[in-house]
Image (spheres, helix red, strand yellow):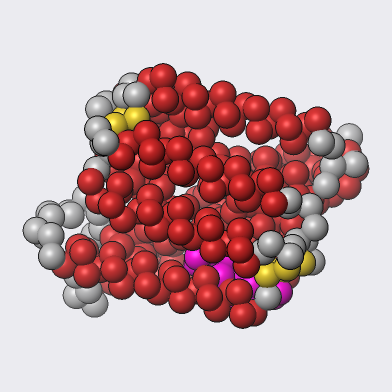
Amino acid sequence: MTIIFDILFIILGVWCVLKGADYLTEGAAAVARRMHIPEMIIGLTIVAAGTSAPELFVSVVSALKGTSDMAVGNVVGSNIMNTMLIVGVAAMVAPMKISKNTVKKDLPFTVAASMLLLFLAFDHFLGHVGGFMLLAGFALFMAYSIYSASRSPEHDSNDLVVQMSKLKSAIFVLGGLLLLIVGSNVFVDHASQLAFSMGISEGVVGLTVVAGGTSLPELATTVVAARKGQSALAIGNVIGSNVFNILLILGLTATIHPLQIEGITTIDMAVMLLSVSFVWIFCFTRLKVERWEGFVLLIGYLAYLAWLIISL
């Protein structure tokens, strides 16, 4: 019965985190628009960070509660899921076109960020210095993104930011923050209890359950976009979120609270690096991920899950 309650609270926590991220993003973007901040900047910062808010809050709360493996596993697992499961399934639904910007900027930055994390956490510890280095990399990524976007034609983004009153904006921001904080605490507490009761390590829970819960929106959005033939933007956001996950989320988390990594192995981080490297190779020449390439990615993800289960 306890396990059933833990699962129900995990689902409730996921719902709170995802709804909180939506509300916070919409409210913050509306406030920024009222302050006459260019919508290009809103898209690159507030909206982009909003898609990574679930991972951010879950990882920070996990670290503060002393479950570092869940914090790191959340990021590593989300990135593996993004590049292998989400891209793989979406490409099998329909071949996915990749924008030149994703191939030239997002994918190389993701590969570099993955290599940096693998290097910094090689001794299974990520402290304040490593956190600052990751944050410095994130600052570089954002500076380059804003510079690149400023040289591109301004797009009409009326659909990006919803018009709303000051009161509604404030309610969305505060309500979103509250849902994120409450949902993250509920999610981490009951995921930890579930792992303890079933004899599963926090690292494995972070790599699977936690990562899956925070990556569900990207999976649904990308598959639907692929079916509609509008995959370039969706896949760009999925891959770009990997950079946010490593540089911003783990950087900020390690800066707030040093991470002692025990249950996340070098193999897990190597799989994360290899997965994004394969996607980069697949789309480097023709700017497309074909169905058979998506099948290869999906098989790779299933093999990784099988390895996790065998290693329990």
Q: Is residue 217 above or below residue 92?
A: below
Tell whether position 252 is magenta. Answer: yes
Tell me where residue 284 appears, x and y as whole percent.
Answer: 30, 40
Of residue 187 and residue 263, the one placed in the foreground of this image is 263
> Horizontally, is 202 left or right of 171 in the view?
right
> Horizontally, is 171 left or right of 256 in the view?
left
Q: Is residue 244 visible?
A: yes
Of residue 11 and residue 47, the one placed in the foreground of this image is 47
Q: Quadrant of residue 126?
A: bottom right
Q: Is residue 210 visible?
A: no
Tell whether position 51 is magenta. Answer: no
Tell me where residue 301 appears, x and y as whole percent.
Answer: 59, 31
Q: Is residue 311 above or below residue 263?
A: above
> Horizontally, is 251 left or right of 145 in the view?
right
Tell me where residue 311 appears, x and y as whole percent.
Answer: 81, 36
**Residue ID at (28%, 43%):** 233
Give, as a single range, the part of the protein colored magenta. Answer: 247-258
**Residue ID at (31%, 72%):** 143
Tell me where residue 109 appears, x and y as whole percent.
Answer: 40, 58
Specify the principal SS of the magenta part.
helix
